[in-house]
Amino acid sequence: MKKGKSNIPKKFQNADSSFIDRLVKEEKDGACTGFKVFPKKLNFYGKDPKEEVVLLTRLHWLAYLPDLLLVLLFLLLPILLSIISSVFNSSISPALYTGLFILGVLIALNVLVTAILKWFYSVIVITDRRFVVVSLKSGFYHSYSEAQLKNIEDVTHTMAGFWGNIFDIGNLDVDTAGHEIDFRLKMVPKPRELQDIINDLVEMKKKGKI
Amino acid sequence: MENSILDKVLEFDFGQMGSLVILLKIPLIIILAVSIFYSFMLILKIRILHDTIDLEGSDKAKVLVYANLVVSLVVGILGIIIIVLG
């Protein structure tokens, strides 16, 4: 067993695949990569007792930038209204102004908490058996999709323009066999590494190594 | 006929807009109530998500959502009282 691989489950320790060393390196690089390698405290609906979670990752924080801008807008709304009312020389009653200010703060708080929850619960989980995507869109809507590794046929990554090059983020497309759901993941950190991990796991699964 | 309507509009005293202020207060109160309801909805959503996927730090997310509900309730009710009495 190589040094630094102690966290890796037995079935992966002798695996002749590039992704294991890459995962170990990712984990050593720290939390800023957004990858959690072989997390122990992770359970999801339908997880089998002997199923090993290989990787947990979240979308890049840039995916939540519009939410953060919305928070700023709602915080600035009362100030903007006061400027507009002073320009047009019309006075808003103090109670109404206070109400608007409280409303702005309340909406901003709710949008911020929703954005944090969206970041926290929108995850991509790769196990030795399946590929799971949980996506929280709002306080009213979330989705849970999964595909068995044996059904994955093609994995493609694309870099998302200007910001993609700066922050090393991109899109990941996972195509599955038949008419099942295909995955279109946007703003994923280090998409080529995710692609390599999925491809290696699919190959190992098809060869019966895991 | 058209001129008389225009005259009435132009003669309207914008200083006496009490009824307009009340009209503006009603949507504000409704939106504040909706915000409080949304905070409550987030708790229900978190409960479902906690059953779906149990991640490291889920408890912190739960605390955050409950704190959000408490703050929303206090601030929202305070806002409604200020708007109604103001």
Image (tube, coloured by chain):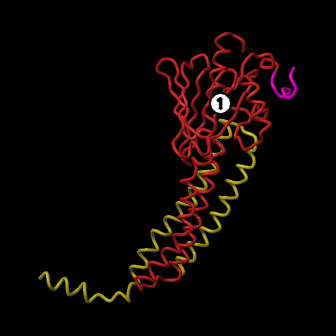
Chain colours: A red, B yellow
Please check the rendered image and state whether residue B69 is part of the magenta-colored stretch, yes or no. no
Q: Which percent across, then down, holds residue B84?
A: 52, 77
Mark 1 crowdedness (10 Å alpha carbons): few <14, some 14-19, many ≥20: some
Q: Quadrant of residue A104?
A: bottom right
Please, what is the dominant secondary structure of the magenta stretch? loop
Q: Is residue A65 above or below residue B7?
A: above
Q: Residue at x 57, y 30 (%)?
A: A145
User: Viewer-proximal residue, A3 or A113?
Assistant: A3
Residue tagged by mark 1? A193
Q: Residue at x 57, y 42 (%)?
A: A165
**Quadrant assignment for the N terminus of chain A:** top right
Is residue A10 toward the left or the right of residue A147 in the image?
A: right
Q: Which percent across, then down, holds residue A7?
A: 83, 28
Q: Residue at x 18, y 83 (%)?
A: B5
Is residue A18 toward the left or the right of residue A13 in the image?
A: left
| Range covered by the magenta-colored residues | A1-9
User: Viewer-proximal residue, A136 or A17?
Assistant: A17
Callout 1: residue from which chain?
A
Q: Which percent across, then down, holds residue A170?
A: 56, 38
Task: Name the amino acid type tagged 1.
Answer: Glu
Is residue B58 toward the left or the right of residue A191 in the image?
A: right
State the count of labels: 1
Q: Farthest residue to the left: give it.
A: B1
Q: Is residue A119 above or below residue A150?
A: below
Q: Residue at x 57, y 47 (%)?
A: A63
User: Viewer-proximal residue, A24 or A56?
Assistant: A24
**Quadrant assignment for the C terminus of chain A:** top right
Q: Which percent across, then down, holds residue A117?
A: 64, 48
Mark 1 secondary-structure assignment: helix
